[in-house]
Image: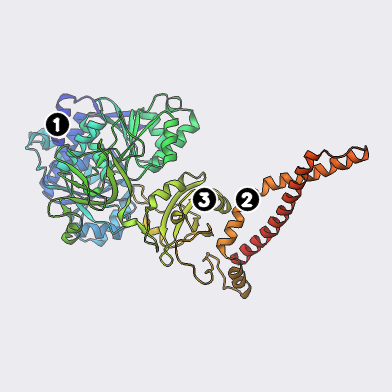
Amino acid sequence: MTLFDEFKRNRDERPDSPAFLIAAGDRSVPITWREFARDVEAIAWMAGHFVPGATVGLLGENSYEWITAHAAGVFGGITVVPLEMTLSPAEIAERLAFVGASVLVHSALYVEKAQEVERLLPGLIVAGFGSHKADEYMALARAALDAGDPGVFDGPPPDEEKTCAIVFTSGTTSKPRGAELTLRGMRTFSEFASEQLPQTPGERSLMLLPLHHIFGICTTYMMLANGVALGVCPDFRRIYDAVARFRANYIFLVPALAEILAAKIAQHGRSAEEALGSPIDWILVGGAPLSRRTYEHLQELGIRPLTGYGLTETTSLYSIAPVGDPRPGSAGMACGGHGGMETKTGPNGELLIRGPAVLKGYFKEPERTADVLDAEGWFNTGDIGRIDDDGYVWITGRASRTIVLSSGKKVAPEELEEKLLCIPGIHEAVVSGDGATRELQAEVYAVVSEDTVRRQIDMLNRQLPVHKRIKIVKVREDPFPRTASGKIKVESTCAPSGKVAIVSTGETDAKPETGNPKPETRNSKPETRNSKLETRNLPIAFTGEVAVFIKAYMLPLMIAAIAVMALNVLKLVLRNIGVELPASLKVFEEIGELALAVLVILVVLGVRHRRRKAFQRR
């Protein structure tokens, strides 16, 4: 059954059941299926009479009006272009001009931005949700429908193979491109997701994923098709209040929101049920990888975390974890064999997919389309992974991010990023290869001191193979910029941001060079002759080993030294009363004296180490 048919069935069989729940003060007001379907038909009537077959841009926060306009468009023969709210007016105008849009529909929050776009694109029709003009046209459309004009759900179903939406990619690693998607692809996602995530009419969930992202659109249509009542949450900062208000049975989230929700629940109770008054059966996290720390935190709160994997180009479909057998660490069950979809890995381990959910192509970019879509219809995801015998997908990294060291060895940065995120205090991390030396470097955002970051990564390096050890760490003062789907913008890590800390391991994968370049810092000054000598005479690798040795053995050596002093005091007391020190204790006395000597040496080395660091920071 198509999504169009599912919506029509809900209108006819469950007209008085809630399709949406809207917050109003301390209560929620339902919008029934009869009301929702009527609003969709009114907007579709307007589009069909005034801009038939047009391409329409849609700008606004998550709202009932947004999804109603979107449904009216895709069911009414309009090509919809969802737009990120963070785009500038110039960027919005550029995208609308590129796709040939003649209409921009926007929410009240973006009136000024829409007006600026209108100034940049003369002739563009601009309409706002809830404006006086929109209300007049809605009244006209309702009157026509009441007078007997057929509504969109009373006419023939839309062509599922036609481009119904142009959704721009997130631009994580390259320029955003407009993917041409279809209702057939959205239906394929809905059918497969419904198999993995059983839902019952009357259950409750929330629209918490950004609707301008394909994952948010697809999950919203799937839940509506299954008769789930959706709570509207336009302000993601109030996620906890929304979950508590609407008593959601399950939720679809991006990782950043999952972290916020887990933290908020933990502030109010030991479990979701204790904090909210009702349990959350599961949450599905998509759009970006979920860290192990957040995964375990959710489990501790009694919430079952599930993962999904997909791309804009695949209508957000590749794999989804089934509720009954999620298999932590995997990206879920591959969709191959369901609804005409096929999945496999290529010769280089890249994940491939073919079927109705795959994009028709990048809008007006046939060359780019040919780069990712071969003649047989296989789409190359660009992700490295494997599909096990049970059909579960395990992603190991992004092909375009694989780091090739000077030794020829390859490192998946995602593996190291996951380990860094397990360190308390490090909230964000990106690993890359230094362009000049090809050594591994990490840029992190942490809420602990730079010295703590250095110590923790020193300890991590000792557990890693030599070629996977991180040589340089950049400590950011601010979080990384992110895309709308919650992914870190990888290109943002190319330029240093914040302080720079050097982490050494005593090992290097590249050939040694003469001298060590002074690390760049935000407040760097020209090198002095003394700093050059200090760097040359006491290499970073050597001082790194000394630092690690001092930190690891200073305490036990100090204890041994104190024991020696106590033993000497005891020996003097015994001699005063005419008793000799037992021979068995003399061995400990000699060991203690040796420990005291080593301690003195380490103190001297520690002073030299600190002096070198002081010179470098100058």
Residue labelled with disc 2: 551
Up the image or down, 378 lies above or below 405; here it is above
Residue 449 left/right relative to 236: right
Do the residues under discs 1 and 3 have CB atoms within 8 angstroms?
no
Quarter occupied by residue 117: bottom left
Three-letter amino acid code at disc 1?
A: Lys
Residue 391 left/right relative to 535: left
Image coordinates of residue 57 in percent, x first then y, are 22, 51
Of mark 1 and mark 2, the one earlier in the sequence is 1
Pick the residue in front: 370 or 88: 370
Pick the residue in front: 271 or 424: 424
Residue labelled with disc 3: 462
Image coordinates of residue 211 in percent, x first then y, are 28, 43
Residue 120 left/right relative to 12: right
Of tags 1 and 3, which is closer to the observer? 3
Label 1, label 2: how many angstroms apart (C-alpha)?
Answer: 69 Å
Residue drawn at (23%, 61%) of the image: 121
